[in-house]
Amino acid sequence: MARWLPRSTDLTRFCQKLNRVKTLEDDMMETSFNRCLSTIDLTLLGIGGMVGSGLYVLTGTVAKEIAGPAVIISFIIAGFASLLAALCYAEFGARVPKTGSAYMFTYVSVGEIWAFLIGWNVLLEYMIGGAAVARAWSGYLDSIFNHKIKNFTETHVGVWQVPFLARYPDFLAAAILLVATAFISFGAKVSSWLNHVFSAISMGVILFILIMGFVLAQPKNWSTQEGGFAPYGLSGIMAGTATCFYAFVGFDVIAASSEEARNPQRAVPRAIAFSLGLATGAYILVSVVLTLMVPWHTLDPDSALADAFYRRGYAWAGFLVAAGSICAMNTVLLSNLFSLPRIVYAMAEDGLFFQVFSRVHPRTQVPVVGIVVFGLLMALLALIFDLEALVQFLSIGTLLAYTFVAASIIVLRFQQQKGDVPAPVASGRPNPEPHEGPSGGELKEYESFSDKLQLVDRDKSKEQREPGQLKAAFEPYLEFLSDFYPGEVVTVAVVTLMVSAICLCSILVFGNTHLHLPTWSYSLLLVLFSLGFLLSLLLIWAHEQQHSTQTFQIPLVPLSPALSIILNIYLMLKLSYMTWLRFAVWLLLGLLVYFGYGIWHSKENLREPRPQRVSARYVVFPGGSLEERVQAVQPSSQPATGLPDTDSDDCKR
């Protein structure tokens, strides 16, 4: 029976395969894409991804049903929470200017299987998101014409009463997706120009809403007679924050476009900061205007802005609001169709997904196969499927990606940069002592005479500490941690931090409701897991991190990413169990694809080290003259070859 069990070496090798990281090229600016996007192009792409139908629908829904006029505070908190995730994307986008967004960032720092699962979830997120926006676009346009399109379809095509299928096929939603797919396939410059047009119209309408809204504002709508500013209290504000957080999920299109940016090191961080700032400002100001124009409890959740202008006697303004809403939804469609094929391209280029999707059109320089295939799939979803039950799935995929990107920032920041040689500290794990030569000098080892030698002065290395090594100030107190290689303790601490965050958030979310814990045990578990989280954070902070980079870096590492991690996990646990069930099914399908295709075709699999064919190693004794005596030192696994034994007698003394 024992012979059928895998050996420990096989299990170790298998785990190493799952957690291998991507090897980046020396020249990361080299690409088959067209680097044509400026900071303004990327900023408008980000605004288009964030300021969509949520501005026209979400503000009214949260104000009436969740937070009241305090939706303003909800958007401020949600904007700050999104900033933590956005800064992580900004640092990665500047340091790794490759397409793939969260998938790529996870692959270069955490490991292959985690990167694949992140990419797999983002793939479905974009497909469902694009199809849902297309159906919302269709419904909004149909409502302008008194639902004539819907009535015509139901009369001549019929009504479906099938689970998971829509009530009727939405041909208009499928058509707009096919048209958008055609424009996206023409190239990044055409997509950017089209996004500029729709974004300009949308921002013009928003400016009109703000000017007219402040003219029509009535401060009494925030008075106690109308329920006050925060009628649902602090709990309503925080519940509104959880909903408003999803209004800012579109900024990752900027990171996905970094391989097409002219100067990604500067353009990506600036574009993310500008777009997130403008989007947050737009949401806050529109919420102020909306709740001041009419009492919050009388808002229409489906079309709050248009209804508010209609009730104040400006029915004509409703048409402008409708036009702005349609243009805003167009930018979201373009954002989804722009990002999705590029993430699929990155996965296919790495060998983790089917190779056909890595083809780039020679003239337009875009992954046209991925654009066409996933554009058609998105149109099919919008045409026949009921997306209401799947929309919540968008949240869990986004939050999971944010969590892994934040963890990847910590891991990457405490790793040695490419080409660094680990420098042992005074109390660290000692390197093998160099051999003594005849005159007491150090022996220098060569793989071959053509290798470049890097002999590090041991006295100097005691003073110089590499990223991932324990800080000198903590060495007297944490001396036992110095025996680990640089970065090992940080990696373990990041895992502990995430486990502590999951346990802490589980107690906060389920402790009183589902688990019915007594007060003493509830408080005790909160204290224990909070201590675990804080101790992990302090342990990470006690190690050296990279500082000498010329690209953007998120401040307050590891605190900022850790706050992002715990917030994202908390919001994920607030989702329904059906969302988690669907998520688990989708993950299982992803694992089938990975183990059936990706793990075998991965380019990193081809780069795995083979047995070294070293013919000899040479030990060179420093002498008093220009001549040096050489000894052939035989590898243990190979026969003796190398230089003649002319000086071997001297060397063996």
Image: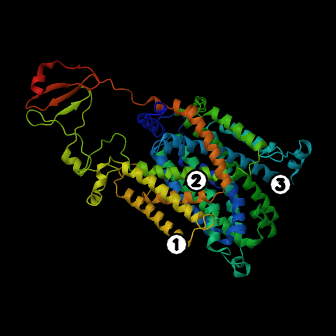
Indicate which label's residue lies in the foreground, 3 or 1: 1
Q: Which residue is mark 1?
A: 520
Front-lying residue, 382 or 650:
650
Picture residue at 75% right of the left edge, 39% below the top: 380
Say which element carries label 2. helix
Q: Is residue 84 above or below residue 295?
A: above
Q: Give the amino acid at mark 2.
A: Leu
Q: Is residue 577 left or right of residue 473?
A: right
Percent of width and height locating residue 210: 68, 65
Q: Which of pointers 3 and 1 lies earlier in the amino acid sequence?
A: 3
Say which element carries label 3. helix
Percent of width and height locating residue 146: 87, 54
For the C terminus, the quadrant is top left
Front-lying residue, 225 or 117:
117
Q: Is residue 456 above or below residue 452?
A: below
Residue count near mark 2 (Cα–Cα under 10 Å), binned few <14, some 14–19, many ≥20: many
Q: Is there any visible trace of residue 296 in the rendered image?
A: yes
Q: Give the amino acid at mark 1.
A: Trp
Residue count near mark 1 (Cα–Cα under 10 Å), binned few <14, some 14–19, many ≥20: few
Q: Which residue is mark 3?
A: 143
As drawn, the residue found furthest toward the front would be 1
Q: Is residue 228 above or below residue 395?
A: below
Q: Which residue is mark 2?
A: 399
Q: Is there any visible trace of residue 261 in the rendered image?
A: no
Indicate which label's residue lies in the foreground, 3 or 2: 2
